[in-house]
Image: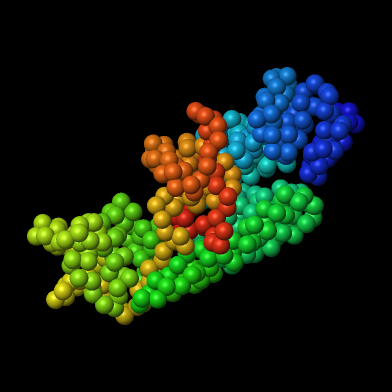
Amino acid sequence: MDSLITAAARALAAGDPFGALNRIALREDAPALALRGIAMAQLGDLDRAKLLLKRAARVFGGKEAVARARCIVAEAEIALVSRDLAWPAKALEAARVTLERHGDHLNAAHARALEIRRLLLIGRLDNADRILGGLDPADFPAALRTVLELAIAGIAMRRARAKDARAALARAMDAAHEARIPALSAEVESAVAMLSAPAARSIACGTERALRLDDVEALFDSNALIVDACRFVVREGRKVIPLATRPVLFALARALAEAYPDDVSRDDLVRYAFGGKEADESHRARLRVEMGRLRALLKPVANVAATTSGFVLVPHGGHDIVVLARPLEERHGEVLALLADGESWSSSALALALDTSQRTVQRALDALAADGKIRWFGRGRARRWMTPPLPGFAPVLLLPGPLPGD
């Protein structure tokens, strides 16, 4: 490798794409094409970057397996940044294996970090955690160490472990300062700010207040009966009753929890759960059936008792009842939460991250665009959706992935 290529590579590692381009901008050999592609990616021209990296990989061919694998890893990083989550993960895994087999452990670890970040985006926290368990951030340079610590913090935040997240972010901040790459420092600072922003709301005994992630963690560690409207479960300690596929039952549970210690009239429950304006005999009959189902499901943690006018929720052991609600409750909040990172997403990537159909996501996007809450650019398969970051709250609890006990 000649001196200009070496100097350009060092400039890119230091986050100086212009310094790299000054050295290799006019060259058409494979190493120069690859470095130009990485430089364009750092400058935000992702389409040009992908073309350059594909050209470099073709020129390298099969004889330069390591160089070609490095180009594939760079392509995967661009796909991740552009939220192309359907980019073939098998190609990244094959490139990682090639790099490890040839002793390029640093770039192999970078490939691992990309896979971890992808898994984190789509809510596969256990898989991401398992891969992270095989890596020790202390073994790597400062820039890669920052990325790994951010991943550790991201997993902790999704699981409402504020203390673990804060410790990981402190390590990430130290590593980012050591790396001296402004973009990395900005990413860490953004993550730190999320810990101080409201992550949810609690509703108890008619009182509502905003909760930071520390408060959510403390709530999960308490003995309270929690009706979790972020993950649609009812939980008490380690007991978790999922109701995500039973929307009527969850609506009834939430109505009873918000009214506790008072009861809720049958007419109000009908309107809340079934959307009926007036409760007739068919509504009352259905309410009795649904209440029987809810009583059976909640038996391990609470009793649903009938009163003269309606029903009341009675927790076992006299524990408090708290409704954990999203910081902003509106239609299609899950889609808004993913778009809140300020990146441009395709509808297919959103569907993959939310584990739902692309058509369902498309309907949500159209509704949000009609309300002026998001915007799009591009056409056909190249269309992307984005929104400015939503100020004032952290969307941690809106994002896919399990919370404690799920």
**Considering the image in quadrants, where does the C terminus appear?**
bottom left
Q: In this view, does 171 lie to the left or right of 84?
A: right
Residue at 14% x, 76% y: name it: 308
**Considering the image in quadrants, where does the N terminus appear?**
top right
Residue at 50% x, 52% y: name it: 337
Residue 311 location, x and y as percent?
A: 20, 71
Q: Is residue 251 above or below residue 400?
A: below
Residue 316 is at least partly visible in this image: no
Residue 70 location, x and y as percent?
A: 70, 32
Residue at 47% x, 36% y: name it: 348
Residue 54 is at least partly visible in this image: yes
Q: Which colour scheme is used?
A: rainbow
Q: In this view, does 246 lie above or below 75?
A: below
Q: Which of 135 and 226 is in front in this view?
A: 226
Q: In this view, does 36 lie to the left or right of 349?
A: right
Q: In this view, does 339 lie above or below 262?
A: above
Q: In this view, does 179 lie to the left or right of 323?
A: right
Q: Which residue lies furthest to the bottom in this view?
A: 318
Residue at 73% x, 39% y: name it: 42
Q: Nearer the viewer, residue 335 or 70?
A: 335
Residue 389 location, x and y as percent?
A: 57, 52
Q: Which residue lies furthest to the right in this view?
A: 3
Residue 29 location, x and y as percent?
A: 80, 21
Q: Which of 137 and 48 is in front in this view?
A: 48
Q: Which residue lies furthest to the left in this view?
A: 281
Please tell me how many numbered marks the rendered image carries. 0
Q: Is residue 390 above or below residue 106?
A: below
Q: In which quarter of the image is residue 196?
A: bottom right
Q: Nearer the viewer, residue 228 or 235?
A: 228
